Image: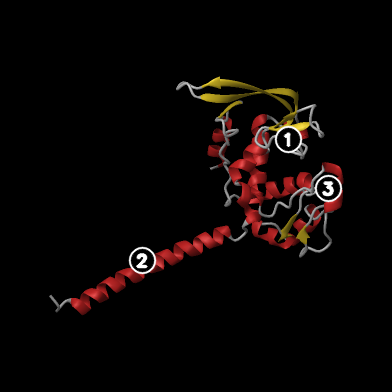
Amino acid sequence: MRALVLVALLSVSSVGHAAETGYRLDRSQHDPRDLTSLQAGAKTFVNYCLGCHGAQYMRYNRLTELGLTEAQIRDNLMFTAEKVGETMRASFGTKEGKQWFGVAPPDLSLIARSRGADWLYTYMRTFYRDPKSATGWNNAVFPNVAMPHALWQLQGERRLEVAQGKDLAGHAMTEYRWTQASPGAQSTLEYDITVRDLVNFLSYVSEPAAQSRKMIGIVVLFVLGVLFIFAYLLKKAFWKDIR
């Protein structure tokens, strides 16, 4: 499964095309059953995101569902809390966020449900240098975003050239051309995997019980199917003498 994910990530082109409605979203290749990916995503979140963005509806002790022990959580992931039962709050408050960025960084507890995994995956991979912005960064998916590129040391600095053109049918379209201004600590593939793991974790945080809920739903549908068979046979038995 992981090999298939790597092949899929390699197929992502460096040049994206978008309709007039905006930048085309790439498909997030995350898997909520991949505990290794979820653990890696949790590590990325607490190291790069938790300084500004909290996940106030998620408690640290729920990370045991990802195969981690409370000791591992306490030693490696708890940077903004003292007790393992506390929520994953940001390092600073709303006031500081407004002073630094002009707007308070949003809580990320439900970001994957509100924005969607594909949006998050594409957003975290489309930051580029923009000297005209207050932070020096901009984003192709979210133009004029107040957030700087938190993972730029991993991805490196990129530049974006936007051109207007037409597709094969003659329809107007926007073409996005990316260039690497400076390398990051990770290759393009490695960075895509890091973002995929982060999106995987944020999707889990937005609904930790999603997998168990789906399993319960499958069991319920199976039971209803069995009951339907018995109900049908009972109906035939009751009405067999009536023509």
Image point (45%, 22%), residue name: 169
Mark 1: which amino acid? Asn
Image point (79%, 31%), residue name: 133
Which of the image's four quarters has the C terminus?
bottom left
Disc marking residue 49: none
Q: From the top left corner, tell me how far across and down residue 142 is, in percent.
A: 68, 37
Quarter of the image holding residue 154?
top right
Element type where label 3 sits in the image: helix
Q: Residues within 10 Å of mark 1 (few under 14, many from 20)?
A: some
Image point (22%, 79%), residue name: 238
Cα distance in 3D space between marks 3 and 2: 53 Å
Quarter of the image holding residue 19?
top right
Q: From the top left corner, tell me how far across and down residue 113 is, in percent.
A: 61, 52
Mark 3: which amino acid? Gly
Q: Which residue is mark 3?
A: 97
Q: Which residue is mark 2?
A: 225
Quarter of the image holding residue 231?
bottom left
Disc 3 or disc 1, which is closer to the eye? 1
Disc 1 or disc 2, which is closer to the eye? 1
Disc marking residue 144: 1
Cα distance in 3D space between marks 1 and 2: 52 Å
Element type where label 2 sits in the image: helix
Image point (50%, 22%), residue name: 167
Q: Of 186 and 18, which appears nearest the observer?
A: 18
Looking at marks 3 and 1 on the same chain, the residue that comes earlier in the sequence is marked by 3
